[in-house]
Image (spheres, rainbow, N blue to C red):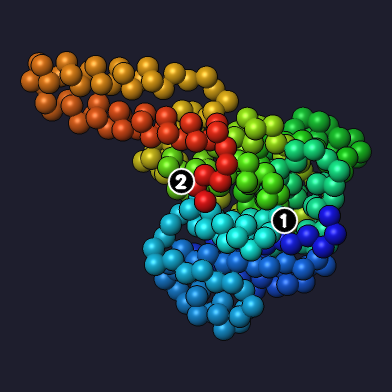
Amino acid sequence: MNNPSIYVVVVTYNGKKWYDTCFQSLQASSIPLHVIVVDNASTDDSVVYIKEKYPIIQLIESDKNLGFAKANNIGIRYAIDHNANYVFLLNQDAWLTEVDTISLMLQSFNNKDKVGIVSPMHLNGAKSALDGSFAEYMSSDFISDAYLGQTKDEYPLLFVNAAAWLMSVECIKKIGGFDTSLFVHYGEDSNFCKRMKYHDFKIILNTSAAICHDREFRKGKEDDYRKLIFKQNDLQKRLEFGNILLDIDIDAFIKSCQKSIKKLYVKFAFSKIPKYKEDLSFYELVKRSRELNKKGGQNWL
């Protein structure tokens, strides 16, 4: 595709220390980029700073913290409404390492069927090693080839985090946005990748392109926070039941909860009913999510 329209979506929240590095790397890109910032109600002077220093950026201000999933969906919707061909999701604490990073990634879409996401390599903030978490997503083929010094240009992946996704709008229109019924922050990218596989879209790692992701300094704190969020929101359960690759009989769970609630009313065990009603609401939510995600289309946007 000649001169594709590429929109970059950056969700910001109190991340001013990274903005210059992030935004200037996008401005220096060898291929023109339209940058959208969705600010999640930052409490520092992020909004003022972006308006004054980067007036060309399309800034969308939220009056509350919407979380990663919904904020990105807002940016994706804006990009689609403005005739984007590709949408590049980039974390506020990440940046392009070279001016041709995006153009290299675009090559992974050329003449290939059903490529939905292309990921660059993720380096740490010092550009001295792979980002620690990113290394966990690598296939055994990549690890073997890297050791032997014969790395290929591309590798298929089952999952890569959404810190730097170049997405085709064709894929988005088929699959939709992040599932905001089940996810707010954490888990939405894993869910999306499973939905991609269900709809036969591929994730490609382009080893010629790279970004830096500056998060090593908060490794321990981030792991603890992730565990807390997973526990508080029962995210493991949401990931499992929301996975449309798994054949789960949600109606059976719903009927079981309804039956238990009726029995508890008969037994006057009213104190136990709220827990079953909570479970029932969850399974009904999951049922709607699974039906929409299997059908596809521009859900959640």
For label 2, the crowd category at 10 Å Cα-Cα, with few meaning under 14, some 14 to 19 and many 20 or more, is many
Task: Tell which residue pokes out farthest to the left in this image.
Answer: 268
Q: Nearer the viewer, residue 192 or 237?
A: 192
Query: Left or right: where does residue 235 sit relative to residue 26?
Result: left
Residue 27 on image: x %, y %: 73, 72
> Which of pointers 1 and 2 lies earlier in the amino acid sequence?
1
Q: Residue at x 75, y 50 (%)?
A: 120
Q: Residue at 57% of width from left, 41% of height from top?
A: 297
- Which amino acid lies under the numbered mark 2 shown in the image of this protein? Thr
> Against 261, is 238 above or below?
below
* Residue 129 in view: no
Q: Which residue is mark 2?
A: 180
Q: Nearer the viewer, mark 1 or mark 2?
A: 1
Question: Residue 239 location in percent, x, y?
Answer: 49, 33
Label placed on residue 200? none
Question: Residue 271, percent across and down?
Answer: 13, 28
Dot 1 corresponds to which residue?
A: 85
Q: Are marks 1 and 2 in contact (CB under 8 Å)?
A: no
Q: Is residue 65 visible?
A: yes
Residue 126: quarter of image: bottom right
- The amino acid marked with disc number 1 is Asn
Mark-to-mark CA distance, 1 and 2: 23 Å
Quadrant position of residue 149:
top right
